[in-house]
Image: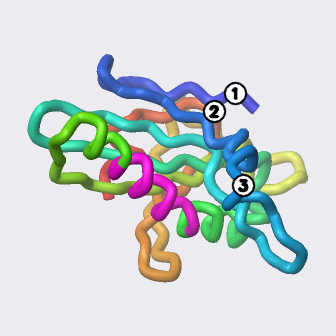
């Protein structure tokens, strides 16, 4: 699945979390789902603030709850990476976290909805977090980050 996010600030760093299971603490143990975290972190930082968007990609929204749970579980990983940066750089930021669940289509059936050039994500509340949920292949960064 390939998604295009428009308007991403030029200083944004993209971190793929697909290989985090290499870290011993994140290896999946029997009966646990430690490695069920989001696919990407988009980190936009400057001198004063840091914005971290956690992004989960799904082919359909049929596994919506699974994707939402993966996003919820990703916050400690994002905070850990932020803390490592703060120690290394000997400084701290005021940080804002946001969540985005993106699906290629709603279901496995043929989708007969009108296509929008750049779809607007909907906000969904899930277990204490607000997630931008969008269906499509192109999104605006600002629309996903607005929480």
Quickly name the residue at label 1. Answer: 2
Cα distance in 3D space between marks 2 and 1: 7 Å
Which mark is drawn over residue 137?
A: 2
Q: Nearer the viewer, mark 2 or mark 1?
A: 1
The stretch in magenta equals 73-83
Mark 2 or mark 3: whose residue is earlier in sequence: 3
- Viewer-proximal residue among 81 and 51: 81
* In the depicted structure, whether residue 95 falls above or below residue 19: below
109 left or right of 114?
right
Q: Sequence-wise, which precedes: disc 3 or disc 1?
A: 1
Q: Position of residue 100 (x, y in %)?
A: 51, 52
The image position of residue 130, as x and y in percent, is 42, 68
Disc ID at residue 24: 3
Q: Is residue 78 magenta?
A: yes
Crowding near the residue tagged with mark 3, few <14, some 14–19, many ≥20 C-alpha atoms within 10 Å:
few
Q: Is residue 127 left or right of residue 19?
A: left
Mark 1, other Cα within 10 Å: few <14 / some 14–19 / many ≥20 = few
* Residue 29 placement: quadrant: bottom right
Q: Which mark is residue 86?
A: none
Q: Nearer the viewer, residue 25 or 4?
A: 25
In this view, the residue in front, 115 or 144, is 144
Q: CA distance from mark 2 to mark 3?
A: 34 Å
Determine contact: label 2, label 1, CB under 8 Å: yes
Residue 24 at x, y percent in the picture: 72, 55
Q: Is 6 covered by the magenta stretch?
A: no
What SS does tag 3 mark?
A: helix
């Amino acid at each position: 699945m390939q998604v295009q996010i428009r308007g991403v600030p030029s200083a944004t760093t993209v971190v793929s979390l697909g290989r985090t299971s290499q870290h011993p603490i994140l290896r999946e143990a029997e009966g646990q789902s430690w490695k069920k975290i989001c696919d990407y972190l988009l980190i936009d930082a400057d001198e004063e603030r840091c914005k971290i968007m956690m992004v989960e990609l799904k082919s359909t929204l049929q596994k919506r709850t699974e994707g939402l749970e993966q996003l919820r579980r990703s916050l400690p990983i994002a905070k850990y990476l932020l803390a490592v940066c703060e120690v290394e750089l000997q400084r701290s930021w005021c940080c804002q976290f946001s969540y985005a669940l993106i699906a290629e289509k709603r279901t496995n059936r043929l989708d007969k909805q009108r296509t929008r050039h750049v779809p607007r994500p909907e906000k969904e509340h899930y277990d204490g977090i607000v997630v931008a949920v969008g269906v499509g292949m192109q999104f605006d960064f600002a629309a996903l980050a607005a929480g």
